[in-house]
Image (cartoon, rainbow, N blue to C red):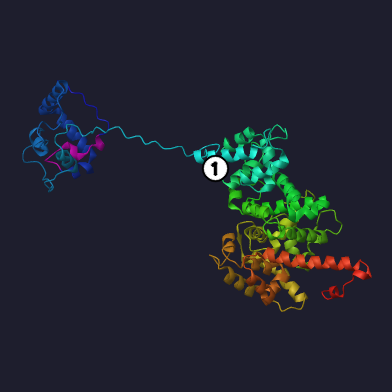
Amino acid sequence: MDIDVVVEDVASLDPELLQLPELSPLAVKENPHAAEDLFSQWLSLPQTGRLVRSLIDDAKAGASINALGNSCNVNAAGSASLPSMFPAGSAPPLSPRSSSGSPRISKQRTNPSLGSPLKLIGEPVREIIPQFYFQNGCPPPKELKERCLSRIDDLFSKYVDGLQEHEFKLVTKEICKLPSFFSSSLFRKIDTDCTGIVTRDGFIKYWVDGNMLTMDTATKIFKILRQPECKYLTQVDFKPVLQELLATHPGLEFLQSTPEFQERYAETVIYRIFYYINRSGNGHLTLRELKRGNLIAAMQHADEEEDINKVMRFFCYEHFYVIYCKFWELDTDHDFLIGRENLIKYGNHALTYRIVEIIFSQVPRKFTSNVEGKMGYEDFVYFMLSEEDKSSEPSLEYWFKCIDLDSNGVITPTEMQFFYEEQLHRMECMALEPVLFEDILCQIVDMIAPEREDYITLRDMKGCKLSGNVFNILFNLNKFMAFESRDPFLIRQEREDPTLTEWDRFAHREYIRLSMEEDGEDVSNGSAEVWDETLEAPF
């Protein structure tokens, strides 16, 4: 009987499976060609032919096949059933082997009743995973939905035909839990056909069926303000909200007679929002940025507080007044544009020419004025917020870009020395005792404690509370001198209310100064009957 054998990869044969009592498995592994020769010799033996025939007969009869014979004793089967490869007495000695034998054999001995090493695996139990992603938001629980519908029925019961825009504020606050100055924006979002009426069914379709109930406040505001098919908010999206705030807030009622300043106030608030919240600086405010910022809390505070000046974040009118007056002072020709020669006068000529040149090179931020060599009002707001509060992260990023001349992400001593040289020259011109750069560099390294002393990264700057002073040392002489003298007045201010930022304290001081100057001008332009001698003291 001819036996056809197909060997795919003899070199990969496991010597344990050959079951050769006369040959060590290690010897076969070290010489793969020996395994091929032995296998060919084994196939030519007559005993091998008889073994293959018996296996074929067993397979035809449906009996369990054991390639090593019917005996469960593998060693016995290997010595009795398989023919020897070597003549008698010429086989090399075997290495010592424990009684347990090969791990493969041990596994077979543990359950000799199995004819095949394959096990029948039962069908796995299917676990039903509840839906956790909903494209349009998670549906509200039944109890929450029923309570909301009951409240909607109560509010709309008196308005069978629906609510008009001026009647919609109660729905915005009571049901939607949003600031009241979102009323018009929400109304127009629902009234897509511009009918001037929002019916009960129309509100339920948008608010309840649209799964707005289960969304957090930031997501609700984001969906209300953003344009259709848009994944971010722009400055224009905030204008309707600011317009309603100006029209309804008691703390801004005095501005209703001056529409121009209403517009400037709204612009300033929006610029401040994007300065602090839009960290990417691309003008596209994402939902992630909105959630990470403190804008929602500031909006709710503004809705509850009658004195708008107590809302320090974004909406404070005094802060707007300081920013606008500073811009107006520098913009001598009042064309709403500022040049290099104007900005150099900021803070009583506090800044160096080199840092002003870097700003107008638009390194820290591209100008929006679209006029060559000119800074617009929005650009000035970004500059002023960065200059007067160097403890904030947007400010640190702004000034870091200025000092990092080669834009490689690190500030080197050479770059710092470039800016400090002008500071040193100014100190000499003012007959001040100059501080050598070597001493300044040691002071900066001790102050920041960077990971590496040969350069400073933005991460190093953000990890130190005194980082702002580094920038003052390099390009703001007035603040550098104040820091060196440790002004006791400023230290006392910080201790009185540590929750206030550097910007809050600066804006408060400047507002008092500007208001006193304005009051003095009003009195000096008035009649002698209203003159108050006490007003002469501050001046």
Quarter occupied by residue 168: top right
Return the residue nearer the eye: 11 or 144.
144
Residue ID at (64%, 33%): 202
Q: Where is residue 180 shown, x and y percent of the image? A: 67, 47
- Quadrant including the C terminus: bottom right
Quarter occupied by residue 463: bottom right
Residue ID at (72%, 54%): 362
From the viewer's perspective, is 262 left or right of 13? Answer: right
Q: Residues within 10 Å of mark 1 (few under 14, many from 20)?
A: some
Quarter occupied by residue 334: bottom right
How many labels, in total? 1
Q: Is residue 470 above or below residue 70?
A: below
Return the residue nearer the eye: 40 or 268.
268
Q: Report helix, strand or loop for mark 1.
A: helix
From the viewer's perspective, is 90 left or right of 449? Answer: left
Q: Which residue is situated farthest in the front direction here?
A: 158
On the image, numbered disc 1 is attached to which residue?
A: 214
- Quadrant including the N terminus: top left
Q: Where is residue 40 shown, x and y percent of the image? A: 18, 31
Return the residue nearer the eye: 383 or 344.
383
Q: Is residue 154 magenta?
A: no
Q: Is residue 376 visible?
A: no
Return the residue nearer the eye: 393 or 308.
308
Q: Is residue 109 visible?
A: yes
Q: Where is residue 424 shown, x and y percent of the image? A: 72, 72
Residue ID at (59%, 70%): 447
- Looking at the rendered structure, the kind of residue marked 1 is Thr
Q: Is residue 20 magenta?
A: yes
Q: Where is residue 455 shown, x and y percent of the image? A: 58, 64
In the image, which residues are magenta?
10-23
